[in-house]
Image (cartoon, rainbow, N blue to C red):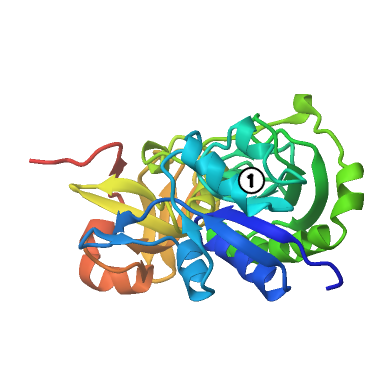
């Protein structure tokens, strides 16, 4: 690296922490880190620092965890840093224009899609769910709109047929830091070559809700297969079988008899549980009952054979007594 930037870094999850690691490792001067306040996590609901905070503390970098960036204290803190640039990666707080204007070269955002497609909170999941064949990383200049800023750099990769949001997240976590370092190295030129987004091509990647994860067996098997992969591992899809909620971790599309009833188990053996859909069928290969681990179907059938047998019906809600 020939040029060192004075950087404020804002981010929260592991995806962001990988970018912070890269910026530090490349020799840039990270003068402060912004991250979300500690949150309760785990069974004990103990307060847990974000991945970005843990990395910053290990590197002895000052950490700020404001609830809002609209306070005079936040503005004064950032102005005093005299940063060249702020790098924002999955931070989770809205940056007002008054904050965006503080760094000498403004603020850059690293976004996990090929903008303007999939602006918003869940670009990785929505790309898989929609059946996109490609996605990637876009680095943009930030402005007040949601992921609407001029694009500085893009890098694409293919979405494979077996891709889950977990595997795609990991691949994008490798791609993003490399592109960010390229941008920081050639920042003045990149800023002058920024390309406006075409708003008419934009799509919105809404945050995943718990209700969305429930499988509607009247839909096509292709649609459900994509959703199962898209929601794995953070919002695993589920359906009710009897009075229990079964999480479906892995499933593939297979054919089904024309007269099959949606949600009914057609066949069940060690190779998989085949469930009829509105069109086609899904063969479930890995699933999870409440309080247990996710297991291959062959292992589940050892103790749950009758419950997972041919003719059993998945329902929209549990058959509770």
> Residue 105 vs residue 118: left or right?
right
> Residue 173 vs residue 287: left or right?
right
Q: Which residue is mark 1?
A: 127
Quarter containing the C terminus: top left
Above/below status of 311 relative to 180: above
Residue 190, image x and y in percent?
88, 50
Quarter containing the N terminus: bottom right
Residue 172, image x and y in percent?
66, 61
**Identity of the residue drawn at 69% across and 37% down:** 101
Residue nearest the observer in this picture, 102 or 203: 102
Residue nearest the observer in this picture, 177 or 294: 177
**Identity of the residue drawn at 61% across and 56% down:** 9
- Local SS, label 1: helix
> Residue 63 vs residue 145: left or right?
left
Q: Quadrant of residue 76?
A: top right
Number of other residues with Cα within 10 Å of mark 1, as a class: few under 14, some 14 to 19, many 20 or more? many
Residue nearest the observer in this picture, 220 or 185: 185
């Amino acid at each position: 690296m020939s040029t060192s930037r004075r950087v404020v870094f804002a981010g929260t999850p592991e995806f962001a922490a990988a970018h912070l690691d890269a910026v530090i490792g490349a020799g840039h001067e990270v003068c402060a880190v912004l991250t979300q306040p500690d949150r309760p996590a785990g069974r004990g609901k103990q307060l847990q620092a974000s991945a970005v905070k843990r990395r910053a503390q290990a590197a002895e970098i000052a950490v700020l965890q404001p609830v809002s960036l609209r306070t005079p204290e936040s503005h004064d803190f950032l102005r005093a840093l005299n940063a060249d640039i702020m790098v924002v990666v999955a931070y989770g707080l809205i940056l007002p224009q008054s904050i965006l204007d503080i760094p000498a070269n403004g603020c850059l955002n690293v976004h996990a899609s090929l903008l303007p497609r999939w602006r918003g909170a869940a670009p990785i999941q929505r790309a898989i769910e929609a059946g996109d064949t490609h996605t990637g990383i876009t680095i943009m200049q930030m402005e007040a709109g949601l992921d609407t800023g001029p694009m500085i750099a893009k890098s694409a990769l293919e979405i494979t047929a077996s891709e889950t949001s977990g595997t795609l997240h990991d691949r994008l976590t490798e791609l993003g830091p490399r592109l960010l370092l390229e941008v920081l190295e050639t920042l003045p030129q990149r800023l002058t070559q920024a390309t406006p987004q075409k708003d008419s091509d934009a799509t919105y990647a809404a945050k995943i809700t718990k209700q969305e994860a429930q499988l509607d067996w009247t839909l096509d098997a292709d649609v459900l297969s994509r959703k199962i992969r898209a929601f794995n591992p953070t919002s695993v899809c589920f359906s009710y079988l009897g009075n229990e909620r079964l999480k479906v971790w892995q499933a593939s599309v297979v054919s089904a008899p024309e007269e099959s009833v949606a949600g009914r188990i057609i066949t069940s053996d060690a190779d998989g549980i085949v469930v009829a859909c509105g069109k086609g069928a899904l063969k479930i290969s890995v699933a999870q009952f409440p309080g247990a681990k996710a297991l291959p179907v062959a292992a589940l059938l050892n103790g749950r054979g009758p419950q997972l047998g041919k003719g059993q019906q998945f329902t929209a809600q549990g058959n509770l007594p």
